[in-house]
Amino acid sequence: MFAFIVLLIVAGACFYFYQRLTALEQEIRAEQARAKAAAVTPAPPASSKKEEPAPVVEKVESVPAPVEVQPEESTSLEEKILAVVAEKPGMKQTELYGLFGDVDKKQLQKIVKEMADGGQLKREKKGNSYLLYPA
């Protein structure tokens, strides 16, 4: 009788964890679909305005200042990333996420990887992150 009760408890626990894992998987798939939809959205057409130089980010050693990213500016996200990396060569890619807090982390990872593949940036593996250098 005791073994039957233990078997019921184990079966109930297995069912509970199966349901939790299924719900977690659905959340992950929904998040991936949203990220994919955001990445597929075409960029707005480039304006004919004269491009302004990239903003200079003040160098703060202890706490980096966040960079505001606004879609209506003529300076692209790639140019802002290049400006920040040029200001502080050898910065960790994870530091970049804090500077561009209003941009999705996965989107930043994708852009930085594309820039490195395109020769605009140099990435050097260091632990769990990459060190970024201007090319």
Image: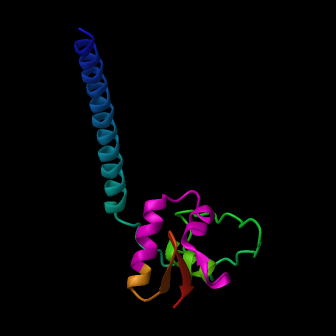
Image coords of residue 14 (percent x, y): 27, 28
Image coords of residue 32 (percent x, y): 33, 52
Residue at 29%, 46% (x, y): give it: 29
Q: Is residue 92 above or below residue 121?
A: above
Colour basis: rainbow
Magenta residue check for 89? yes
Please state which of residues 19 and 77 is positioned toward the viewer in this rendering: 19
Residue at the farthest top position: 1
Q: Which residues are magenta?
A: 86-114
Q: Would you identify the image quadrant in which residue 4 lies? A: top left
Q: Is residue 10 above or below residue 84?
A: above
Q: Would you identify the image quadrant in which residue 38 lies? A: bottom left
Query: Would residue 127 appear left or right of 10 to someone viewing this image?
Result: right
Image coords of residue 21 (percent x, y): 31, 37
Residue at the farthest bottom position: 135
Quarter of the image with the N terminus in it: top left
